[in-house]
Amino acid sequence: MFDSTPVTTMEFAGRQIFVKRDDLLHPEFSGNKARKFAYFLDNDFPSVNKLIGYGSPQANSLFSMSALAKLKGWQLDFYVDHIAEQVKQQSDGNYARALDNGAKVISLAEMDDREGLDSHEYIETKVMPNEASAMFVPEGGRCGYAEYGVAILGKEIALWAEGMNIKGLKVCLPSGTGTTALFLNKYFVELGCDIRVITCAVVGGDEYLREQFLQLCSDAKCHPFIISAGKKYHFGKLYREFYQMWQQVCSQGIEFELLYDPLGFICLERYLAQQVDSPILYLHQGGLLGNVSMLPRYRRRFGEV
Ligand SMILES: *Cc1c(COP(=O)(O)O)cnc(C)c1O
């Protein structure tokens, strides 16, 4: 489905690192979600005409699922807890572009039969029993079929490292659900190569991420190394050090995104400070459409670049 994405280099923490440009994977997807959804793109589902998902109305996964649905000719019903007025008014970004793709975004705050259920429970008990031809994809594309596309990414990286004769490569990427990091590391372990994944918990902390890994794979040998952030950050909140890190890494000409990448680079810097000399490949997982709403918030809070 996709061509192999390019690898470039940049200076970081006084050394050169490689950057895998998965942001260039497909113009209609956040790179990360396109990898996870490759299974749906590469296979036919004759009995499906609707995709059902849930998450934040500003999430990359909303936009990416709307792109997937559009490509497949399916309807997308995306359940959210509620939609802030300010999000409704945005003319660009994940929410606006998902609506352009024909997505139906359904707010649980407006449902009479919610009965205190969270989105996942609501879909399983109230929605799916009445949807014979719908496919339910849990938050962020976290589930077994993500392994298919992430393994293709793993293969690209392994072939590249072999071609460059790079030994002991560490692939660094920030985690949300941990699905990408887990399946990528699992691929390298099962291949028997010396490449390993290092990651950090952008959502929910190290313990939550470890639990996610366990749910996806009970064999601890497959689990990526978690770099601790050293301090608690809340997902989606604005931090001055995030903004500074983002400006620093973007100054070399590659635009990164503002939700995951700042902490990814902060943790990578911490990791490299421990006298690590392994070659590093940072995985750019796309998500740049989210900057349309995040950057104005950062500018209002901390000023211009
Ligand atoms: C979804 C996403 C992530 C998190 O991926 P997980 O597989 O859930 O860990 C990271 N970066 C970007 C840009 C994303 O869109």
Image: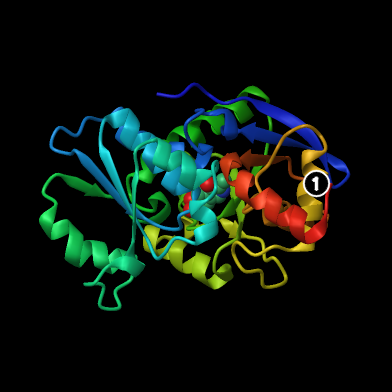
Q: Depth check: 41 or 85 in front?
A: 85
Residue 285 visible in the displayed image: no
The front one of 127 and 158 is 127
Residue 125 x, y percent position in the rendering: 18, 67
**Location of mark 1 (residue):** 247
- Colouring style: rainbow
At 79% from the left edge and 52% from the top edge, which residue is drawn? 245
Q: Which quarter of the picture shows residue 269?
A: bottom right
The residue located at (72%, 58%) in the rendering is 267
On screen, residue 83 versus residue 286, left or right, reads: left
Q: Residue at x 46, y 58 (%)?
A: 56
Q: Dot 1: few (<14), some (14–19), or many (≥20) neighbours within 10 Å?
A: some
Is residue 51 at least partly visible in the picture? Answer: yes
* Label 1 element class: helix
- Viewer-side residue, 167 vs 291: 291
- All told, the count of numbered labels is 1
Outermost residue, right side = 14
**Residue at position x 41%, y 58% from top?**
55
Please identify the quadrant where the N terminus is shown. top left
Q: Is residue 269 left or right of residue 127?
A: right
Q: Position of residue 115 (x, y in %)?
A: 25, 78
* Amino acid tagged 1: Gln
Residue 225 is situated, as x and y percent measured from the top left of the image, at 60, 58
Q: Residue furthest bottom?
A: 116
Q: Position of residue 32 (x, y in %)?
A: 50, 41
Quadrant assignment, res 128 = bottom left
